[in-house]
Amino acid sequence: MENNLVIKTEKIFEKIKHVDESGVEFWYARELMEILEYTKWGNFVKVISKAMEACKNSNINTSDHFADVGKTIKMPKGAEKVVDDFKLTRYACYLIAQNGDSRKKTIALAQTYFAVQTRKQEITRQEYEQLSEDEKRLYTRQNVKDKNKFLFDTAKLAGVKNYGKFNNYGYRGLYNGETAKDIAKRKGISEKEDILDYMSSTELATNLFRITQTDEVLKNKNINNENDACKTHHNVGQAVRQTIKRIGGTMPEDMPTPRKSAKEIEKEKMKRLVEKNNKKKGK
């Protein structure tokens, strides 16, 4: 039951997440308000004000995390009305959850969810080295997910329409001809599962390099058609592979496949944090 609650919580907050044209994630305060079970905007604004104060006290620019925006809502008889709203970063949502009514179960769940997600994005190199392999996987997997958004935006501008084809060109270059389907088969996982969720932190980092470098090359060479974009992705994948070979590293297809997926590790971590939170409250 507790595990189902963790899964449901993640889906709820992910469902109202938005991504702007730069691939940056954000949430609207009015949508978050409903999830956190606040019925009056005036009461929720007070929580937002406390969160903004906490942000300011940490010497962080509040405008970077709390953007004051207007939102148009539908009224009876086809009329429209502009209401106040805020565009919030993940960190802003975390601060709001921290300053919300702790008696609400949804607030406790939000605190856990945004704490985990925010922590994954804010870490130093020294801290990274101290993480366990599972923690490194979660952190690097999130980076791969974020950078892939940028790459697909760049690929779209370069004329790519078939993203599956584009992706496979990159994999084939890096994995000595293997497509995503081939990689999944070799790893012994279903084609419906994301192969990136079944990669070690090292294999993920290898793919992260492929992704970021392809993004740079597509921009620098002003690629403007799908065929050239696919060839570019393949060439970058091959170049990364050749670099690994030259320095005596392990080829990506020879790297071990983790027993658990990144999603399973994430759910287990969320579950532990929920249980810890409940213990603090004496439940």
Image (tube, rainbow, N blue to C red):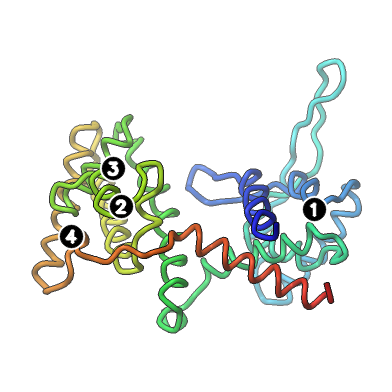
Q: Earlier in the sequence, mark 3 or mark 1?
A: 1
Q: Which residue is mark 4?
A: 240
**Secondary element at image label 4:** helix
**Where is residue 90 drawn, in percent x and y?**
62, 59
Residue 165 in the image: above or below residue 251: above
Residue 157 in the image: above or below residue 149: above
Q: CA distance from mark 3 to mark 4?
A: 15 Å
Q: Earlier in the sequence, mark 2 or mark 1?
A: 1
**Secondary element at image label 1:** loop
Closest to the camera, between mark 4 and mark 2, is 2
Q: Which residue is mark 1?
A: 36
**Where is residue 53 drawn, in percent x and y?**
78, 69
Q: Quadrant of the N terminus?
A: bottom right
* Amino acid under disc 2: Gly
Residue 187 in the image: above or below residue 280: above
Q: CA distance from mark 1 to mark 4?
A: 45 Å
Q: Which residue is mark 2?
A: 188
* Amino acid under disc 1: Leu
The reply to whether discs 2 and 3 touch (Cβ–Cβ < 8 Å) is: no
**Where is residue 245 drawn, in percent x and y?**
10, 67
**Where is residue 132 drawn, in percent x and y?**
44, 78
260 relative to 250 in the view: left or right? right
Q: Which residue is mark 3?
A: 167
9 relative to 152 in the view: left or right? right
